[in-house]
Image (cartoon, rainbow, N blue to C red):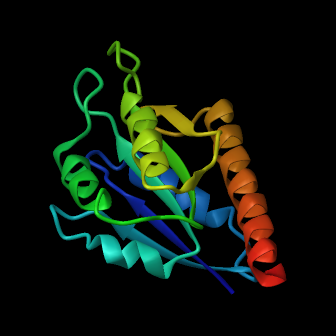
C-alpha cells in the first residue's frame, strides 16, 4: 500500500471539505490515507516522512496571507528534507480579496524548497467547493497526484 497524508488547515470548514473530497478520489485498494487537521503548532515535521505522498490544504487569510497555523507549520517544515515525497496543494479563499488563494502558491514554494516533487496543478476554491469547476479541479489534482505517486513508487522499486 502507498501511504498518503492529507493535512489541512481549515477555519470555516471549506478547506476541510476539499480534503474530504480529495480523500474520496483516492483508490482505497492502492492508498492508505490519513486525514489530519493542523493543530496550532502540534504537527511534528518528522511525521511527514512516514508518508509516500502528502496532499496539503490551507485557506488564505485576509488579503493573501498564510493563516497562523500554516505559518507555524512552515517554520517546522523548513527543518526537514522531503526528497522523494510527492506533494499536492489545495485551498480555499475569497475572490473578494486581491490575494485570492495565494496561500496555495506560497505553500507550493515552501514544499519545493524542501525538495518535494510538487504537482503542478493545484486546487483553488472560492469559499465552498460546490461549483462544477471546483469538483473537476479536485478530480484533476487527485488523478495527477495518484499517477505521480504510482510512477514514483515504480521508480523506487526499479532501483
**Outermost residue toward the front?**
159
Quadrant showing the C terminus: bottom right
Res 40 → quadrant: bottom left
Q: Is residue 30 left or right of residue 68?
A: right
**Viewer-side residue, 105 vs 152:** 152
Residue 140 visible from this viewpoint: yes
Residue 91 visible from this viewpoint: no
Q: Residue shown at 31%/50% (left/top)?
A: 10
Q: Residue shown at 25%/69% (left/top)?
A: 43
Q: Position of residue 7 (x, y in %)?
A: 41, 63
Q: Residue shown at 34%/77% (left/top)?
A: 46
Q: Is residue 15 above or below residue 131?
A: below
Q: Position of residue 119 (x, y in %)?
A: 63, 47
Q: Is residue 145 left or right of residue 109?
A: right
**Outermost residue toward the bottom?**
1
Q: Is residue 56 above or below residue 1?
A: above
Q: Is residue 128 above or below residue 23?
A: above
Q: Is residue 49 left or right of residue 122?
A: left
Q: Is residue 143 above or below residue 85?
A: above
Res 91 → quadrant: top left
Res 78 → quadrant: bottom left
Q: Position of residue 44 (x, y in %)?
A: 26, 73
Q: Position of residue 86 (x, y in %)?
A: 60, 61
* Count of marks, rendered view: 0
**Viewer-side residue, 92 vs 149:** 149
Q: Residue shown at 21%/54% (left/top)?
A: 75
Quadrant showing the N terminus: bottom right
**Viewer-side residue, 99 vs 20:** 99
Amino acid at each position: 500500500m502507498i501511504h498518503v497524508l492529507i493535512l489541512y488547515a481549515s477555519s470555516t470548514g471549506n478547506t476541510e471539505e476539499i480534503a474530504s473530497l480529495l480523500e474520496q478520489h483516492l483508490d482505497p485498494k492502492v492508498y492508505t490515507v490519513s486525514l489530519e487537521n493542523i493543530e496550532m503548532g502540534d504537527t511534528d515535521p518528522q511525521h511527514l516522512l512516514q508518508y509516500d505522498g502528502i496532499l496539503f490544504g490551507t485557506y488564505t487569510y485576509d488579503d493573501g496571507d498564510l493563516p497562523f497555523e500554516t505559518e507555524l507549520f512552515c517554520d517546522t517544515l523548513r527543518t526537514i528534507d522531503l526528497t522523494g515525497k510527492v506533494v499536492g496543494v489545495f485551498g480555499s479563499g475569497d475572490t473578494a480579496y486581491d490575494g485570492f488563494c495565494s496561500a496555495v502558491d506560497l505553500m507550493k514554494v515552501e514544499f519545493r524548497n524542501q525538495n518535494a516533487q510538487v504537482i503542478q496543478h493545484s486546487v483553488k476554491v472560492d469559499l465552498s467547493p460546490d461549483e462544477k469547476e471546483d469538483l473537476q479541479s479536485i478530480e484533476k489534482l487527485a488523478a495527477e497526484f495518484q499517477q505521480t505517486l504510482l510512477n514514483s513508487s515504480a521508480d523506487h522499486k526499479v532501483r
